[in-house]
Image: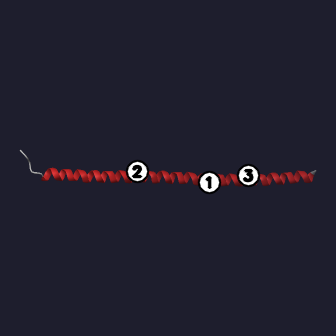
Amino acid sequence: MVLIHTRSLENQSESSTTFNDHNVCLQQLNNQICEQEQQLAILYAQQQLNELKAQIHEDTLIESQLIQNITTEPLQN
């Protein structure tokens, strides 16, 4: 009877260790997923900023060209 009880405790200990190991692995995977989601969010924000910068640059060029056209056109009375 004592032998059976001892084996039962050993099995519980092994199960508990395995369970804890799985929990640690799951937590590590969850952390990696969170980090990757944050990196994707940062990349998306950077992409949007780059698109806005390109649009501003394009708008600035158009505005500059319009101003140049206005200042170089002769006045018509």
* Residue at 92%, 52% in the rendered image: 2
Q: Position of residue 77 (x, y in %)?
A: 5, 44
Seen as rendered, the residue at the extreme front is 76
Q: CA distance from mark 1 to mark 2?
A: 29 Å
Q: Counting residues from the N terminus, which is met first, the one under dot 2 or under dot 3?
A: 3
Decide: few, some or many residues near mark 1? Use Cα within 10 Å; few <14, some 14-19, many ≥20.
few
x, y percentage for residue 67?
Answer: 18, 51
In three-dimensional space, the C-alpha distance between marks 2 and 3, rounded to whole angstroms, equals 43 Å
Q: In the current view of this chain or complex, which residue is farthest to the top?
A: 77
Q: Are marks 1 and 2 in contact (CB under 8 Å)?
A: no
Location of mark 2 (residue): 48
Give the residue type at disc 3.
Answer: Phe
Under mark 1, the amino acid is Leu
> How crowded is the residue under tag 2: few (<14 C-alpha within 10 Å), some, or many (20+)?
few
Disc 3 from disc 1: Cα separation: 15 Å
Give x and y (percent) for residue 18: 74, 54
The colour scheme of the drawn protein is secondary structure
10 Å crowding of disc 3: few (<14), some (14-19), many (20+) = few
x 89%, y 50%: residue = 5
Q: Is residue 65 left or right of residue 47?
A: left
Q: Say which residue label 1 marks.
A: 29
Q: Residue at x 63, y 54 (%)?
A: 28
- The dot on residue 12 is none
Task: Tell me the amino acid under the disc marked 2.
Answer: Gln
**Label 2 residue SS:** helix
Q: How many marks?
A: 3
State which mark lies toward you, 2 or 3: 2
Q: Residue 52 at x, y = what percent?
A: 36, 50
Q: Which mark is residue 19?
A: 3
Q: Contact (CB < 8 A) between labels 3 and 1?
A: no
Secondary structure under the numbered disc 1 in the rendered image: helix
